[in-house]
Image (cartoon, grey):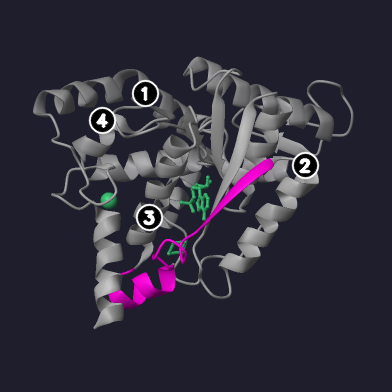
Amino acid sequence: MKCKICKAEAVVALRSHNAAFCPECYKDFFARQVQRGIESRKLFTRNERILVALSGGKDSLALMLELSRQGYDVTGLHIDLGIPGSSAAARAGVERFCAKHGLALMVREMSAEGLPIPQVKARLHRPVCSACGKIKRHYFNKVALDEGFDALATGHNLDDETARLFSNTLRWDTAYLSDQGPRLDSEQGFVRKVKPLWRLSEFETANYAFLMGIDVHTAPCPYSPGASFTALKGLLQRLEAAMPGRKLDFYQGFLARGRPVFARREAEEGVCLAPCTACGYPTSSGDLCGVCRIREALRDTASA
Ligand code: AMP
Ligand code: FES
Ligand code: ZN
């Protein structure tokens, strides 16, 4: 198989693009897709400061490296969850990666914030993943705003986004359908959130990470029974195999024709947000936000 661009030996074949690439042309393809993803949805500019959430997995590290290669002003943020047998390795991987490439990194430790995930897990009587996700998102937002960043970027890829969209659609969750997408504008108390890898699949991102020699943290979280949306990702994978390109069409069609309809409906209904009385960040759930409620519950348990 020959590279579509330069006719050298190809190493990656992409059915959705009806193309194969050699290593160098594949890196150019990946860079173009990221650039198109950023420009077509006006995610951010080279004059803005972007905080990139780095878990240590292939997606966020690939995103960080590619944005810095393209001359964007990026700083990494790692949330150390304090999970034994997992968090130390993820953090070390992120620190090694940033040191190797000369990239700025900030780390926030959840144990120092009164929110070590093992204790959150012990206190809850349900799976810890959704509380953990809420805590991570709270700190992504808080650090970005406190440190004056223009946007917060995550490594979500096309497979993550289409699986989430499919899940939201199966439940006809109009609130989530109204604001899912690669760009969520900033509003009072919330920084702009962006997902620059939205055009690229997990396979495409994994190939880029491999070809760029990125050392990724692959161990799954010991608290999650499996990756999220596994069944839906499998279904969409089968659809893509039968109809190459369908995943991207589904997502782009939603952004163009679905989301605006749901967004109008949500705007009519209106959501009432007020500042959390403890941390000041907006919440719709009464006086304390979800994260401050968890912190409070842990404090009560410790002093009981
Ligand atoms: P996940 O929900 O684990 O698939 O992660 C989605 C995205 O959230 C990743 O691509 C990262 O950008 C970000 N992320 C997840 N976990 C962390 C973490 N511990 N620290 C910083 N960013 C994270
Ligand atoms: Fe949060 Fe596993 S990463 S529970
Ligand atoms: Zn709060």
Any mark on residue 255, and which?
Answer: 1
**Type of amino acid under label 4:** Ser
User: Residue at 66% of width from left, 22% of height from top?
Assistant: 32
**Mark toward the start of the polypeptide (2 vs 1):** 2
Could you say which is closer to the camera, residue 191 or residue 57? 191
- The type of residue carrying mark 1 is Leu
| Boundaries of the magenta span | 104-127
Q: In the figure, 296 relative to 35: above or below?
A: below
Residue 135, disc: 3
Q: Quadrant of the C terminus?
A: bottom left
Tell me how far mark 4 sits from mark 2, CA to CA. 38 Å
| Type of amino acid under label 3 | Ile
Circle 1 or circle 3, nearest the eye: 3
User: On screen, 142 above or below 217?
Assistant: above
> Is the residue marked 4 within 8 Å of ligand 1, measured from its CB?
no
In the image, residue 142 above or below residue 25:
below
Identify the residue at image location x=33%, y=60%. Answer: 131
* Marks 4, 1: nearer the viewer: 4
Give the residue number, with chain letter if any, for mark 2. 101
Q: Mark 4 or mark 3, which is nearer to you?
A: 3
First along the sequence among labels 4 and 1: 4
> Could you say whether the residue bearing mark 2 is in a helix, strand or loop?
helix
Q: Quadrant of residue 34?
A: top right
The residue tagged with tag 4: helix, strand or loop? helix
Label 4, label 3: how many angstroms apart (C-alpha)? 22 Å
Element assignment for label 1: helix
In x, y percent, where is residue 104? 67, 41
How many residues crowd mark 3 within 10 Å: few (<14), some (14–19), many (20+)? many
The tag earlier along the polypeptide, 2 or 3, is: 2
- List the residue tagged with mark 4: 178
